[in-house]
Image (cartoon, grey):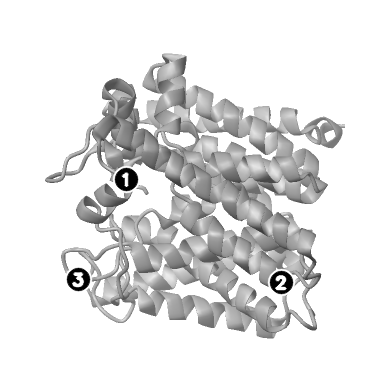
Amino acid sequence: MLKQILYKPYILVCVHFIFLLTLLFVLQISGIEKFHSGIDGLLNFDASWYNDLKTNGYIFSSSAQSNTGFYPTFSFVWRLTGLSPLGISILNLFLFIIAFLILARNFNFNIKESLILLSIPSLIFLYIPYTESLFFLFATFILTGLIRRIKFYILSGLFLCCLVRPVTIVFLPLIAFLALLDKRNESGNLLYFVQLAFACIIPYFLVALIQWDVTNVWFAHSKSQIMHWDHNFHIPKLPFTTWGGPRTIWLDGTAFWLGLICIGACCYLLFKRLKPVLVLSTPTLFSIGYLSTITLIVVFLNGYNENGQTSLLSLNRYFFATPFFFIAFLYFLRSRPFSNKEYLYLMLSLVFVWLLFGAYTKIDWLNHIKTIIFFSLLTVVVLGIVLTLNHKWFLQKNIWIFLYAGSCFLQIYLLFRFLKGDWVG
């Protein structure tokens, strides 16, 4: 009876968020974590820039960071609604819920899949004053259009996504990837991919025009990001790092590991495109292509830290807080159990990634021994999650319920950290 009730996605979502609110309340009254900065903490980091853009409009500065480094759509919606930081956060939450329900319906999420996806820690960015929620909703249009073969949904989703965030540079290589995998080579099909490309390119110039109209500076966003955020092409320098050090490496590092797996899958698909041995749905192809591209862009376009190391900061929110990760992750959840050899390959690939992050040396405030312990624990936890979600014995014992509860705790923990002004992504 309980399963029949929970199987309705909207009820399941309500139960999940009641559980999150309960966790938040327990942590607050227990004294383990507190809202030290109160609701004002919602305006930390990028949220403060969106609030500034909402309040003051675009202001370009050639000598310092300015709000022209951000796209206008979310701030425009915020200004239009007249909501407070808490109000816009609640609106973002509702937009995410709507998008999730659309995904759940079109991709037939079951109870386990729904709860695991809803518990992903990085989803906190979907209910704070960030662009993630609008992007998630519009990206859901793309995936819905792909699975239902409705071109209008795909084109409008691409257009709106590129109007919310600077992802034209992400989607164009992805469209080329899909075109290369397409074996029909028909003129009508070529026109389709050209239409997809233009749906991504037009918003880029539209944002440039909006910023020029206010600041009299062409491509102010790109100039701000290059001059003051150091977002231009860099040769990666090891070991990789991220803001917050060990407090955030587990997020950005895991996203990077999964990104490498997606890149490997894309290369394999391109190599075998004449004789495909791995058949994936179009939404899954699009999703792993997006995750691959965003990983490469962060690696090559992010700047260096003060020690000259490549920083992968924010990769986790660009990666996990998207419906593209949901669909790619869904493929994993529905795949057959891995063989022992495949588990070994996963472990070796994970160790390789931790070596790229400096597992062989000291990182931040950790000495050699603590660094080794830190990455060893990360390896055990990540492989434990894979086993829980894929291994036959773990599946039979329903251990995933404990994973769900633990991930929800981490999600609320990250929310507390953000509100206190600690970097999350």
The alpha-carbon separation of the residues under discs 3 and 2 comes to 38 Å
Work out which residue is located at the far left of the displayed protein and give it: 63
Q: Which residue lies at the image location 43% right of the left edge and 48% below the top edge? A: 166
Front-most of residues 275 and 338: 275
Per the rendering, the mark at residue 221 is 1
| Residue 214 placement: quadrant | top left
In which quadrant of the rendered view does residue 36 lie?
top left
Residue at 71% over, 57% down: 191
Q: Amino acid at mark 1?
A: His
Which is in the foreground here, disc 1 or disc 3?
A: 1
**Residue corresponding to mark 3:** 308
Tag 2: residue type? Leu
Q: Which residue is mark 2?
A: 181
Q: Is residue 330 in view?
A: no
The numbered disc on residue 384 is none
**Element on which disc 3 rests:** loop
**Residue 46 place in picture, x, y as percent:** 32, 39
Frontmost residue, 155 versus 6: 155
Q: Residue at x 46, y 79 (%)?
A: 351
Which of the 4 quarters of the picture holds residue 129? top left
Q: Are the residues flagged by discs 1 and 3 in contact, CB closer than 8 Å?
A: no
Q: Earlier in the sequence, mark 1 or mark 2?
A: 2
Amino acid type, mark 3 = Gly
For residue 188, side relative to residue 264 (left or right): right
The answer to whether marks 1 and 2 mark residues whose Cβ atoms lie closer than 8 Å is: no
Give the alpha-carbon distance from disc 1 to disc 2, as whole Å: 33 Å
- Depth order, front residue of 242/298: 298
- Using the numbered discs, state the Cα–Cα distance from disc 1 to disc 3 in whole angstroms: 25 Å
Residue 92 x %, y %:
51, 29
Instruction: Tell me the mark number nearer the camera, choosing from 3 and 2.
Output: 2
Secondary structure at badge 2 equals helix
In this rendering, does residue 191 appear at all? yes
